[in-house]
Amino acid sequence: LELDKSSLASLQSYASDLSGWIGFVAALVIGPVQPHSFALKHGIDALTIEVHVPTTSVGASAIHPHYADFSRCIEHLLRSISNLHERLHHSVAQYTMPSPSKFVSHGEYIYPAILVSLPMVVRAASLALRDMTSFQFVFVGTVVGTVLLASCVNAYTVFTSGRSFIGVMMMVVAWVVHRSIPQSRQEIETGVDFDTTNECRKSLRFVACLIGIYLHVPLLLANYSLGFPSAVFWTPLLAIFVLSDRLAAMCSKNTVLKTIMAIAKILVLVAISPSTILPSNISPQYALILYTPLQLLLTALWLV
């Protein structure tokens, strides 16, 4: 495949902008951070430096009134330019920069975020309208309550002792899941035989997709640099990598395949745990409020 000079230049420019955008996003998520970011965390939007210069002719440190007036004019000019820059800047308050001379506003980058999160919406809608026969309220309520409680306990231990017990919480959630699953097969009032375990899995996946959407929408609007990679990571795990009913039934009947699948799921869960995959300097609010609950929900979902 041969490209002309203009196409090759466009491709190189696109690749350069893409790498610059990835670097910009990575810098916002894991650093290095700019010096003013620490002030923003404490609600400090600006710093004012005030200088008092005596204008009288008494003393060696005094200056002529004309020089003082000239300094005030320079100060007013810089302040007006700063206010104008602030107005222009806040007209596009959220943006990403693929290069020092280009930026992508929130009105443009919100569409990829919608497309990335759309599979969770489609999966939840298909489960609610077509796939689920009976929503398992007791099972889902028990599991979601356990996940919420485990997330709160883990957050408390992190803030008080600086240690995360996500592995212990995952084992607790797995134990609750196995204890809460009803009898594997039962006959409903209509006389139709159906798999209760499969219905529990579908019900839990429906709720997990809703929770994933609920947690990522505000994050995408407030911190796109963190929300977009998070949505790219969690959307396939919650909504795309799903076995069909026929394949799931075949795996459950084959002991060897079932064992291999269980070991693979456990290894993946350990590999994507917060203490393993998340950088140490990432936002602790993201790790405790979004990542940990979704990690525990995925544990429950894969071990049903």
Image (cartoon, rainbow, N blue to C red):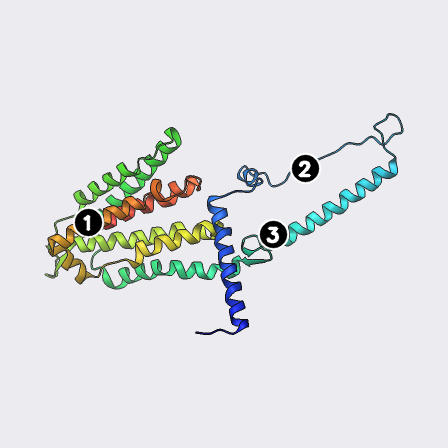
Residue nearest the viewer, comparing 294 with 128:
294
Q: Secondary structure at mark 2?
A: loop
Q: Between disc 1 and disc 3, whose residue precedes?
A: 3
> For the residues marked 1 and 3, what is the alpha-carbon distance in whole angstroms?
51 Å
Mark whose residue sits in front, 1 or 3: 1
Circle 2 packing at 10 Å, graded few (<14), some (14-19), many (20+), is few
**Residue 169 % position (x, y):** 27, 38
Residue 270 position within the rendered picture, expressed as x and y whole percent measured from the top left: 28, 44
Residue that mark 1 sits on: 262
**Disc 1 + disc 3, Cβ < 8 Å:** no
Quick one: SS at disc 1? helix
Badge number at residue 48: 2
**Quadrant showing the N terminus:** bottom left
Q: Are marks 2 and 1 in contact (CB under 8 Å)?
A: no
From the image, tell me which residue sits under label 3: 90
Q: Is residue 230 left or right of residue 137?
A: right
Q: Amino acid at mark 1?
A: Ala
